Image: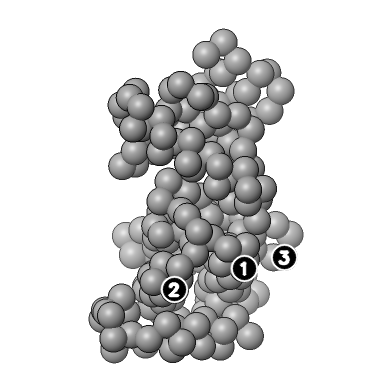
Amino acid sequence: MSDVVVLSHIGTGGFGEVKKIMYKDLFVACMKTGKEDNPQMVSLFLQEARVLYKLAGVGGAPKLHAVAKNHPVIIMEFCEGVTLEKLSELECGQGMSLGKFFGICNQDEMDIRRAVLKSVGCRLMELHQAGYCHNDFYTRNVIVNKNGDAFEARIVDFGHAGPKTPLDIHDDLADFNTILREFGLLPKQDRNPRHPKKKLKGLQEMVETFLK
């Protein structure tokens, strides 16, 4: 693609590879390409592109720049920041607190975690209010950036996203519940929040209480 200059490799997922690029010599963007170039993969990428187009940034989703009609290629907004997965790895593997990572010295660590995860929860609620569920809401697909004194969360990788259903809302909220527990913001007595007996209403109340 003559309009694209690859700057770095971001990661590889189930459907393909993601790279940071310079697009048309104008701005930095993100390019996702499929592992296989076949009609089925093209259809999946077009479906993801439609979701991104309709969301237009709602829920922190990356804005769509371009999509190929006959090949599995999407070019979208590059989301600055670090994934929750990386933050968790730094904390567990290197003992680096969120406060130290973000250069915050005058705030309690748990308050910083709450601020970060509240920004994440608000984005998920925006996505649901727009009529969509993510369906792959894990730490690797949430990016956080510090903007002044506030945190800004972005949700990425909409390859499994679609119109919301009660079951999909339940699973998104259950995944957020798991993230909150991973960062020590909820008790760990419930080891399986995705269990069918876990009622949607209870999960919604939990998230609403946390976001207050």
- Left or right, residue 32 beside residue 191: right
Dot 2 amino acid type = Pro
**Residues at discs 3 and 1 in contact (Cβ within 8 Å):** no
Q: Residues within 10 Å of mark 3 (few under 14, many from 20)?
A: few
Q: Which residue is mark 1?
A: 129
Q: Pick whichever, 184 or 108, lies toward us.
A: 184
Q: Is residue 206 visible?
A: no
Q: Position of residue 85 (x, y in %)?
A: 40, 57
Dot 1 amino acid type = Gln
Q: Residues within 10 Å of mark 1 (few under 14, many from 20)?
A: few
Which residue sits at x=48%, y=35%?
46
Q: Pick whichever, 158 or 151, lies toward us.
A: 158
Question: Alpha-carbon distance for marks 3 and 2?
Answer: 35 Å
Q: Quadrant of the C terminus?
A: bottom right
Between disc 3 and disc 1, the foreground one is: 1
Q: Position of residue 125 (x, y in %)?
A: 58, 70
Q: Which residue is mark 3?
A: 149
Q: Which residue is mark 2?
A: 166
Which residue sits at x=36%, y=32%?
41
Between disc 2 and disc 1, the foreground one is: 2
Between disc 3 and disc 2, the foreground one is: 2
Q: Position of residue 164 (x, y in %)?
A: 49, 64
Label 1 element class: helix
Q: Is residue 44 above or below residue 141?
A: above
